[in-house]
Image: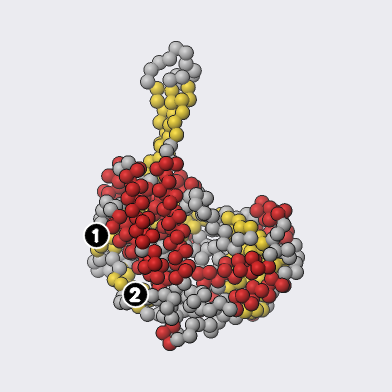
Amino acid sequence: MSFVRLPESPIACRNLVGGEWVLPRDVQRLEVRSPYTGEVIGHVPMTSEAGVAQAVEAARAASVGWRAMPLRERTTLMARFRALLESHLERLSHLAASEAGKTVAEARAGLLKGLEVCDFALSLQNLDTGGALEVSRGVSCEFRREPLGVVAGITPFNFPAMVPLWMIPTALTVGNAFILKPSEKVPLTACALGELLVEAGLPPGVFSVVHGGREAVEALVAHPEVRAVGFVGSSAVARRVYAEGSARGKRVLALGGAKNHLIVVPDADVGLTTQAVVDSFTGCAGQRCMAASVMLAVGDVQHIVDQVLERASRLECGAGMGALIDQASRTRLEAAIDAAQKAGARVALDGRGKKPAGERWANGHWLGPTVLDGVRPDMEAAQRELFGPVLSIVRVPTLSAALEVENASPYGNAASIFTTNGAVAQAVVEGARVGMVGVNVGVPVPREPFSFGGTGESKFGHGDITGVASLGFWTDLKKVTRKWSSRTDGSWMS
C-alpha cells in the first residue's frame, strides 16, 4: 500500500532545550510503533523532573528578551514558521499519519487547521492593538496585553500536529516562551515542528520540546515558573491537571473527552446527512473529541439509517479510514461492542476483523466502521466515550426527547442537528447545552477567529484554546490610567 510513508529507520527523539537537541541522561526510552504495522518507527525519552526543570529554566531566561521584542518582530518570525509549515506540508502529513494511524488526508487536514491558527496569530499585529480612551478631563485610560512568561502545552496522540498548533502560534506571538510536552505515543511530529521553529529563527529557549509521560506532566504542572498550562486529553486526566495546576495558582485550560450527538429528523437531506454522519464517526478512526458517537434517530428515519450503513460498509481500512493507536484501544473497543450486544443492542455493521490486504499490515491495529442499533440511553455505549469508529443509534420519538438525551450527558462538547427546517435547527441551537453546535455539519469545528471549546466535563477552566477567546488565556491585561496636570474644569477623576 502507498497511502502512508513510514520512516525508513527508527527516529531517535530528543528534547529541544535552549535551542539544542539533547538526550536526557539516565532516563528510560520507549519504542514508538506505527499503528499501521506495529513496526518500531522511533524511540522517545521519558524525561524526569530534573530534565523538565532544565527546560523551564532555559525558557525562563529566553522569555525576558522575547517579551521585550516588538510584536511586529515576533510576528515576522512566526510568518517564517508558517511558510516552512506550508513548504513541508506533505512530509509532515506522512509523518503524523505514520505515528498516529491517520490517513494522510486526515493528517494534512490537521496541519491546514494549524495554518489557520497561524493566520489568526499573524493578524494580531493589526487587530489586537489594545485600547485607549480619554475618560475624563485630562485623564486617559488604556489597556495592553502582557505575556505571562513560561507556558506549557500538553497534547494528545490523536492530533500530533493540529493540537500543538492550536496553542503554539498564538502563545508565542503574544510573547510567551512555550514548552510542548507531546504524547509519548506520537513524538515524531513534535520534533519536526521544533526543527521548523528553530529554522524560522526563534531565539534559543523560546520554544522547547520535552518528551515523557506522567512524571514530565506532573513536573510541568508543579513548576513555579510555568504560569499557564494548556491540556487536551481525557476528561479524567483533564480534571486532575486542572485541579493540580489551579491549586498552585496557575492558569489552566484542560479540554477533556466528549459524547457528541447527531440528531437526525425525518426531513433531513438524505445525501448530506449520510455523508456527514459517516465522516463524523469514522474520521480519524473515531479517535477525536469531535467524533459523533451517538446518532439520535428522531421518528422514522430508517431510510437514512440504511444509507449510513451502506456507505460505512464501503469504507476500506487503510485507504478510507486509519488505524487505532494501539492494541489496547482495539481490545477495549471490541469489549465495548460485546458489552453492548449483551445489553440488548444489535450490531448492524460489524467492523471486527476488518484490515487492509497485505502481509505488512497484518499486525496493525484495525477496526472497521461499526454501528450499534437499538441502543438505549442508559447503556454504556450511549454514555461512555468509546473513542473509536463505533456509532450507537438511539431511537427517540420526538425532538424534545432527543434534547433530553443530549442534555443528560455530563459532557458538553458538541451536538449537530440534521434538518431542512429552520425552526427545528434553531430549537437545537438554543436547547443543546454544549459549546459547539452544528446545523447539517457533522464535525462542527469553528473556523478562526471563532474559538474551539466545549462545556461541562469536556472543558475544565475558562476561555477557549483557539481564536479570540484564547487571548485572555495566554496574556494578562495591564490597565494604565494617566494624568499629567491638574484641571480646574475637571470632573471627580481629574
- What is the total number of numbered labels drawn onto the structure image? 2
Q: In this view, does 296 lie above or below 150?
A: below
Residue sitting at x 58%, y 78%: 314
Residue sitting at x 40%, y 80%: 38
Category of crowding for the residue at label 1, using alpha-carbon neighbours closer than 10 angstroms: few (below 14), some (14–19), many (at least 20): few
Task: From the top left corner, tell me how far across and down residue 27 is, in percent.
Answer: 28, 69
Q: Which residue sits furthest bottom? A: 359
Residue pointed to by mark 2: 7
Q: In which quadrant of the rendered image does the N terminus lie? A: bottom left
Q: In this view, does 170 lie above or below 417?
A: above
Say which element carries label 2.
loop
Labelled pair 1, 2 in contact (Cβ < 8 Å): no
- Mark earlier in primary sequence (1, 2): 2
Q: Is residue 453 found left or right of 49 in the rendered image? A: right
| The one of 247 and 77 positioned closer to us in this rendering | 77
Task: From the top left corner, tell me how far across and down residue 370 is, in percent.
Answer: 59, 76
Residue pointed to by mark 1: 20
Q: Is residue 124 found left or right of 349 in the rendered image? A: left
Q: Is residue 238 found left or right of 70 in the rendered image? A: right
Residue sitting at x 41%, y 84%: 360
Name which quarter of the figure residue 455 lies in: bottom right
Instruction: Residue type at mark 2: give it.
Output: Pro
Name which quarter of the figure residue 70 lies in: top left
Category of crowding for the residue at label 2, using alpha-carbon neighbours closer than 10 angstroms: few (below 14), some (14–19), many (at least 20): some
Task: From the top left corner, tell me how far across and down residue 463 is, in percent.
Answer: 50, 49
Instruction: Residue type at mark 1: give it.
Output: Glu
